[in-house]
Amino acid sequence: MKKTLFILSTLALLSACNKEAQDSKVTQKTPPASVQATLVPETLPTDQWVGKWIGVEGLNLTISKDATIGRGHYVLSMQYGLDADATGTFKGVASEDGISFTRPDGPQVLRAGDGEATGLKWLADKKDCLVVNTGEGYCRP
């Protein structure tokens, strides 16, 4: 009799533990798609940067989406210096600050700014620009 009571008590305890595990699974559900859509915007702010940008003295930048990798990935084709070897195509990824990429002179971040932020007097009056560093910026034509 004691043995039967012990077994029933154990089963009751185990089923209660199993119910708690099931309840915790219910509360940890993934948010519905409508909520997820509001958490991650369909279009990234950096998607608006796709296109051609002009710098000074022949410097230029063309940004395109990298469809082979997916959302938030870009291809940057740029002439970033006056020397012939200061040109190239680089893969970039959307980051909190802009588009992060690496070129021979090291890791860089392309950020939104205006002509003043470029530090270049020829672009000072422009409003829609992208800046890598002071002295290197590109604005919409």
Image (cartoon, rainbow, N blue to C red):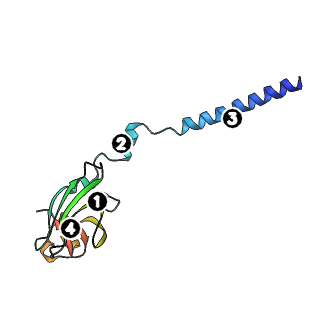
Residue 29 on image: x %, y %: 50, 38
Name the residue at 22% across, 60% down: 76
In three-dimensional space, the C-alpha distance between marks 2 and 1, rounded to whole angstroms, equals: 24 Å
**Label placed on residue 30:** none
| Residue corresponding to mark 3 | 17
Where disc 3 sits, the SS reads helix
Q: Nearer the viewer, residue 31 or 60?
A: 60
In the rendered image of this protein, does residue 93 appear above or below residue 138?
A: above
Q: Secondary structure at mark 2?
A: helix
Look at mark 2 in the image and give the residue it sits on: 37
Q: Which mark's residue is nearer the viewer, 2 or 1?
A: 1
Seen in the picture, residue 95 relative to 138 is either above or below; the reply is: above
Where is mark 1, residue-wise?
92
- Residue type highlighted by circle 1: Gly
Can you say which quadrant of the picture contains the C terminus? bottom left
- Disc 1 element: strand
Q: Residue at x 28, y 73 (%)?
A: 105
Name the amino acid type tagged 2: Ala
Q: Amino acid at mark 4?
A: Asp
Tell which circle, 1 or 4, labels the residue nearer the N-terminal end.
Answer: 1
- Mark 3 to mark 1: distance in Å? 49 Å
